[in-house]
Image: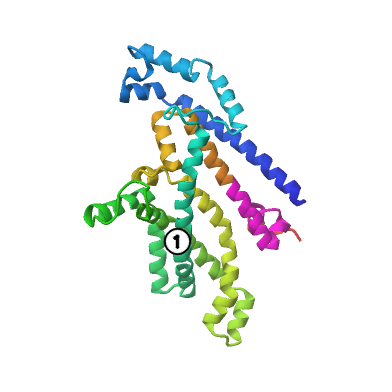
Amino acid sequence: MSFMTYLGKRVVRMVLSLIAVSAITFTLLQMAPGNFADIQRISAGAAQFGGAGTEDMVHAFASRYGDDIPAWRQYLIFMKGAATWDFGPSYKYPTQDVQDIIAQGFPISATIALIAVALSLMIAIPIGVYAAVRQNSAADHGTMFLITLGTALPNYLTGVILVLFFTLTLGVLPSSGWDGPQHMIMPVLALVLGPTAVLARYVRSSMLETLREEYVVAALAKGGPRATVITRHALGNSLIPIVTVLGPLLAALMTGTVFVEALFRIPGLGLYFAQAAASRDMPLLMGTALFFALILMTMNLIVDLVYGYLDPRIRAAGGVNRWRRSQKNPQQQPA
C-alpha cells in the first residue's frame, strides 16, 4: 500500500468518524431533558428573552435560535456550517462564534497539556528504567504500587487536594484564574500524575523487553558496564514504542482537561465544554466535541506516521494497529 493511499484511507475514516461523533452528540443533546431556554429561565428568568412568562420565553428562544424547526433540519444546518468551520454563534456567548471561542481556548488547553506531558516524561522515564533494571526488588514493587495509585487517582481529585494544601493551608498559590505562571502550577500538577504513571509503566515494560534482547544480553555477557549497556544500547530502543502512547496521551490531556479547567476556572476548551454541557449550548457543545474528536484522531494519525518512520516493521505491517495485531497472531505477520 502506497503512502498516499494509506493517508487517503485514514482521512476518509476520520471524516466518517467525525460525522458519527456529531450525530451521536446531537442525538444525546436531543434526548437530554431541558434546553438552553429552560436553563436560562431557571438561572436568569424570562426577562433575558423578552418574554413575560414561560411560554413567551420558550417561543422567543425557538425563533431566535431555530429551535422551532425539526431536529433533523437543525442537524443538517449545523453540519453544513461545520463543513466550512462555521459553527455559528454560541447560545451562552451570543456575540461570539463558536469557532472563535475554540481559537481562544485551544492555546490555553494545549499549553497546559504540553507542559504536563513534558514534565511527565522527565519523571516517568527514569522511574520506569529504574524499576525495570531492579525488577522484582522492593524498589520495583514500591514503584509499581505508586504507578497503580497514580493511574487510579482522578485528576480532579488531585486538583482538590492541591487547592486544599497550597491555597487554603499554605496560601502560596491562587486557586483560579489565568493571569500568570503562578496560575499554571496547580493545573499542571493535577494533570501530571496520571500521565506519569501511564508512561512509567510503558517505559518499564518496554525496557524489560529490550533487556531480554540478544544484543543486550550479549553486550552484558562480554563484560560491558551495565550502566553503559543500558544507556547506549537498551534505552533508545526501549523508548521507541512510547511514541505509540505519547500522541494519544497528549490528545487525551488536551481534551480531558474539563474537570481541571472547571475547578481552577481556566478559560480553556475544557471550561467552555463544561459550561456548554451545563447550559445546553448546542453549537458550543457540538463544536468543542467535534474539535476534541479531530484532535484525538489527528494525533493518532501522526503517531502512526512517526512510528512507521522510526520502526520499518510498522510500514511493512501497514500501521501501528495492524502491527499490534500481527504481534498477537504471528502467523499473520508479513514476511
- Quarter of the C terminus within the rendering: bottom right
Question: Compared to 99, does 123 lie above or below?
Answer: below
* Residue 34 visible to the viewer: no
Q: Residue at x 60, y 79 (%)?
A: 217
Snapshot quadrant of residue 186: bottom left
Q: Residue at x 57, y 20 (%)?
A: 73
Determine if the magenta segment contains residue 131: no
Whole-percent x and y of residue 273?
A: 44, 37
Q: Nearer the viewer, residue 179 or 155?
A: 179
Q: Nearer the viewer, residue 228 or 54?
A: 54
Whole-percent x and y of residue 24?
A: 53, 31
Tell me which amino acid carries mark 1.
Leu
Question: Compared to 68, does 324 lie above or below?
Answer: below
Residue 183 as seen in the image, left or right of residue 313: left
Q: Residue at x 37, y 58 (%)?
A: 149
The colour mode here is rainbow
Looking at the image, the residue that sits furthest to the left is: 169
Q: Which residue is mark 1?
A: 119
Determine if the magenta segment contains residue 320: yes
Q: Nearer the viewer, residue 97 or 1?
A: 97
* Residue 240 visible to the viewer: yes
Magenta residues, dominant SS class:
helix
Dot 1, crowdedness within 10 Å: few (<14), some or many (≥20)? Answer: some
Snapshot quadrant of residue 18: top right
Whole-percent x and y of residue 104?
A: 48, 41
Question: Compared to 222, does 113 lie above or below?
Answer: above
Instruction: Write the start and end of the magenta stretch as one range.
Output: 298-324
Question: Compared to 57, does 107 lie above or below?
Answer: below
Residue 235 as seen in the image, left or right of residue 115: right
Q: Helix, strand or loop at disc 1?
A: helix
Snapshot quadrant of residue 33: top left
Whole-percent x and y of residue 266?
A: 38, 44
